Image (spheres, rainbow, N blue to C red):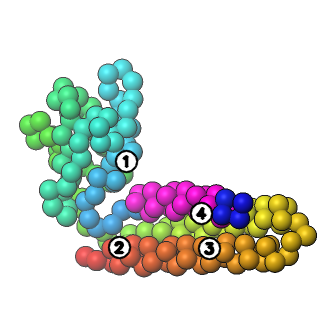
Amino acid sequence: MDDQVIKEFKQKIQKVLDVLKGDLATIRTGRATPSLVENIVINAYGGSARLKVMELSTVSSSDTQTLILTPFDPSIINEIAKGIEAANVGFTPSVDGNIVRISIPPLSQERRTELIKAMKHKLENGRIMVRQVRHEAIEEIKKEYEGREDDITRLEKAVQKVVDDTVDTIEEWGKHKENELMQI
């Protein structure tokens, strides 16, 4: 029974980390990465779809400043270019035969500072989610092990150890992302 409580807690913590990792991926660094455009919605075939890999095109980077989109259906190449422009994310796509090229402009120092601030906000939200999961787990432990103080103390320590490790991981991610943002 003890292992089950901790196992469920670890699963919830992993979900928090997955969400945070996805959030951090959306913060643009000076580098061209597919995550910068994969959630852009494109109007094609009378409906809309995300640009994600395997929906409308493959997305790759040819160098640190250029993304290459190769549509599965070349007939929608202009819709993809229009959708990227309409998304207003600061990219100017150019159609080059059967591919779309996007040159990623370098970040200004002011923009880097803004992105670091946004990243720190996302990291704090991640830490808040971790604390909420910890609080729920401790409440569950207290309810389930009422009157068994030794078990409660032991499980609370196990929960806190996972929380401490998770917060350390979040801090490492933050340092790594800040280093990426500061590279020119």
Provide the secondary structure element on which disc 3 rests.
helix
Residue situated in front as seen by the camera: 86 or 139? 139
Provide the secondary structure element on which disc 4 rests.
helix
78 relative to 125 in the view: left or right: left
Provide the secondary structure element on which disc 1 rests.
loop
Label drawn at residue 88: 1
14 relative to 86 in the view: left or right: right
Residue 163 visible to the viewer = yes
Q: Residues within 10 Å of mark 1 (few under 14, many from 20)?
A: few
Where in the figure is residue 98, as x and y percent of width and height? Answer: 11, 36
Q: CA distance from mark 3 to mark 1?
A: 38 Å
95 relative to 144 in the view: left or right: left
* Mark nearer the viewer, 2 or 1: 2
Q: CA distance from mark 1 to mark 4?
A: 38 Å
Region in magenta: 5-26
Instruction: Name above or below for residue 151 compared with residue 31.
Output: below
Rendered-image quadrant of the N terminus: bottom right
Q: Could you tell which of marks 1 and 4 lies nearer the N-terminus?
A: 4
Q: CA distance from mark 2 to mark 3?
A: 27 Å
Label drawn at residue 163: 3
Q: Residues within 10 Å of mark 4 (few under 14, many from 20)?
A: some
* Mark nearer the viewer, 2 or 3: 3
Q: Could you tell which of marks 2 and 3 lies nearer the N-terminus?
A: 3
Evaluate if marks 3 and 4 touch, with contact meaning CB atoms under 8 Å apart.
no
Q: Amino acid at mark 1?
A: Asn
Seen as rendered, the residue at the extreme left is 97
Residue situated in front as seen by the camera: 53 or 1? 1
Identify residue for label 2: 181
Secondary structure character of the magenta stretch overall: helix
* Mark nearer the viewer, 4 or 2: 4
Evaluate if marks 1 and 4 touch, with contact meaning CB atoms under 8 Å apart.
no
